[in-house]
Amino acid sequence: MTPDEFQAFAEANPAVGTALQSALPATPSRSYTGITEAAALVLLFPLARFLLTEIGLPWLTTLERYSEVQRQRVERWIDSEAQGHGLDPDRIEEASKRLMDELEKSQDVGTRRQWERLTELLKQSYRERCLRGRQPRPLP
């Protein structure tokens, strides 16, 4: 999945798009001023990809909420990866908190299915890149 496909998915799936947009006020990079809200969704792509594929959806675990350990993993990712993706670490950290809160509030079956579909698309894309030798390790 590319950033453009991610944006198209968010636009076609309103529950996902709304949750992502709620995290947007915190996400614009220092180098992305004056962009539209729709285009800003692409800025969340690296964060969402990590969160959904490496951490997972809270309702698919034994807990309905993210644990402190899971939140710390996201913070470590931000510390090591955010700037490499052109993201301001402080803003993306705030976006990650907002996005995790949105995922924890997801109770509607349709909304959860949209998130699960996005997660599967991201994992499938990652696996395909691994097979082509673009990534060093497969997802769990």
Image: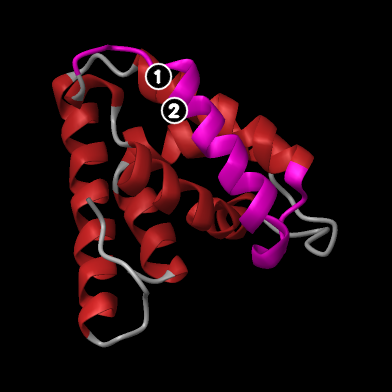
Q: Which x, y percent locates residue 111?
A: 24, 28
At x 37%, y 75%, the residue is 135
Q: Position of residue 44 (x, y in %)?
A: 55, 50
Q: Kindly identify the amino acid type of the residue bearing the numbered disc 1.
A: Tyr
**Disc 2 to disc 1, how far (Cα)?**
6 Å
Q: Is residue 22 visible?
A: no
Dominant secondary structure (helix, strand or loop) of the stretch shown in magenta: helix
| Residue occupied by mark 1 | 66
The local crowd at label 1, few if under 14, some if 14 to 19, many if 20 or more residues have their Cα within 10 Å, is some
Q: Which residues are magenta?
A: 62-89
Q: Is residue 79 magenta?
A: yes
Picture residue at 77% right of the left edge, 50% below the top: 88
Q: Which mark is nearer the camera, 2 or 1? A: 2
SS of the residue under disc 2:
helix
Check the picture and name the quadrant holding the N terminus: bottom left
Disc 2 residue type?
A: Gln
Circle 2 is placed at which residue position? 70
Q: Are marks 2 and 1 in contact (CB under 8 Å)?
A: yes
The spot of residue 73 in percent (x, y) is 50, 36
